[in-house]
Image (cartoon, grey):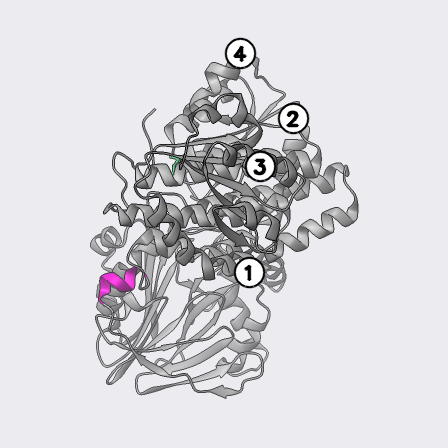
Amino acid sequence: MCGIAGYVGGAEAAPILVRSLKRLEYRGYDSAGVATIHNKQVFVCKDAGKIDEINKSLGLERLPGCVGIAHTRWATHGAPSKVNAHPHLDCTGRIAVVHNGVIENFLLLRKELIDQNHNIVSKTDTEVVPHLIEEHIKRGLSFEEAFVQALKRLEGSYALAVIFLDQPDTIYVARKEAPLIIGVGEGFNMVASDMTALLDMTRDMVFLHDGDAAVVKADGYRIFRLSDGTQVERMVRRVELTIEMAEKQGHPHYMLKEIFEQPTALRDSLRIQREYVDLLAELLDKGRVIFLLGAGTSHNACVAGSYLFSALARLPSYPVIASEFVANYGGAVGSDTVILAVSQSGETADVLNALEYARMRACTILGLTNTVGSTLTRVSRAYVLQNSGPEIGVAATKTFTSQVLVLAQIALRLARLRGKIAQYEMDEFRQELLKIPNEVEKVLTTASVKMRALAEILVEKPFIFMLGRGVSTSTAYEGRLKVMELSYIPCVAYPSGESKHGPISVIESGVPVIFVVPPDEFRKPNIGNIMEMKARGAYVIVFGDEKDDELRSIADFYYGLPRTHPLLTPITYSIPFQLLAYHLSVLKGYDPDKPRNLAKSVTVP
Ligand code: M6R
């Protein structure tokens, strides 16, 4: 996730753009840049680092000119560095582009452009855009036609803002699956990824739709559909939110915002680079022993990953808590061991310590992380990025669901490589994978209201049980962590079958037990466990299929979810737990964004 902004009007653009970038910094903060046009020249200033630092050292806000575009970056393709920072230019230095999103077919386009003698200098996906526009101009198209034709070649997601030396009074913009807003002013207009970047200048905003493009000038703008050029009108809305509310996109907390942006995060996690997924799968397949290693939520994703690898690729792997790795397995690892480390931050000390030990014993280290340039990316032989954007709430939400989705993609790749399940099963699984962002969207339409009601029932309970079988064990573990860390109510999670080997002794009248029961082969034994709990007076809460009336009839509280592939249910079924945790925290008067005693990244062992 990155942030973009643009200004065209009567004032100097750069100071306005730097202020907008500061508001967008929460969307990414590893590098930043501004481009302006003045006196028949394009000026560009950019570097790696925080906006304030770059501004201090290079004077971002001193660039001259009354038209400009700006960018703050969260690296996805290419490490945070000056050359990879936006804006990006074409070969002539006349076209400057800023971009938020992921261009999936950039490798192909890049090769094509290099064959046409374009000088591509960065490792980003974005840089193909100015060169594609340049290429179309060379073929005789007007700038607007070249812009449209270039965009038609792009696969993936984008919010783009482009300036062109020969039209120093115009910003060209377009969006597809990434947000973009026009800020309408008196004698100026702006564009930005979100409202916060515009609120200092104007409260009148036009929210572009997917597939819209616009030509923006100081005294007006024209919006048209990229597909066929049809001109469209979009309503100007007056935004009354405070800047603080706008930063959270109208939600009272970052956590809630991040829960609701999961469909977008998951779409981005489906756009990970294929060649790295292939490489990871090949290296995993070579291991004699395989560990999936992580801490906290990332460990819970590893538990889900282990079920996925086994079910789809018949590949056994051990999910292991990072801090236990050396004590438990240290003596047994060597050059035939492959470790896939999962860490959102890529900086968790327990993970890095385990990897340091493993590296000394010649294990192959692989990584799955959200953070380009993190230590995990540097110690891994190969890594893949989950692409879920920055997460500000301490509790991992969108990063868990994205991790599971990436592990599912690796599992599918392994399945194809190893050929242990039928082709139709792989194809079906892939179809279900692609549908997941939409299924999550459906869950989000009902889950918050239902979980608020459940939170009111549970808020005074002294403890809560969570149970699941098979891959739902990971959902129960993650549910336990979310509810416990945010509500401070002690929680216990087990595989359902294990409950009668001890934990059931604490059940008495009214003890809440949440069962995770998707419609898979464990539904029947789970019903057995539910009856055992009911017989002892438990208050039975079930998260199950929306059409499962039998389950609904035996539960004291039922939340029905849409059907997905059973192995993907940790993604959909973890969402009610996230919202339950959130509402419990709010009901108890705590701050869900900053639970006590915790840090977002735990860099001490
Ligand atoms: O950055 P990591 O994924 O390595 O972080 C590991 C844990 O500290 C983290 O998942 C933690 O458990 C969550 N913030 C809990 O919601």
Ligand 1: quadrant of the figure: top left
Between the C-alphas of marks 3 and 2, the distance is 16 Å
Callout count: 4
Label 1 within 8 A of ligand 1 by Cβ = no
- The answer to whether the residue labelled 4 contacts the one labelled 1, judged by CB atoms less than 8 Å apart, is no
Between the C-alphas of marks 3 and 4, the distance is 24 Å
Number of other residues with Cα within 10 Å of mark 4, as a class: few under 14, some 14 to 19, many 20 or more: few
**Dot label at residue 438:** 1
Residue highlighted by disc 2: 287
Q: Quadrant of residue 63?
A: bottom left
Residue range highlighted in magenta: 242-248
* Residue 483 image point, x, y percent: 37, 40
- Looking at the rendered structure, the secondary structure element under dot 4 is helix
Between the C-alphas of marks 1 and 3, the distance is 21 Å
Q: Residue at x 52, y 67 (%)?
A: 131
Is residue 30 depicted above or below 500 in this figure? below
Residue highlighted by disc 4: 331
**Dot label at residue 305:** 3
For marks 1 and 2, the one nearer the N-term is 2
Number of other residues with Cα within 10 Å of mark 1, as a class: few under 14, some 14 to 19, many 20 or more: some
* The magenta stretch spans residue 600: no
* Residue 604 image point, x, y percent: 31, 27
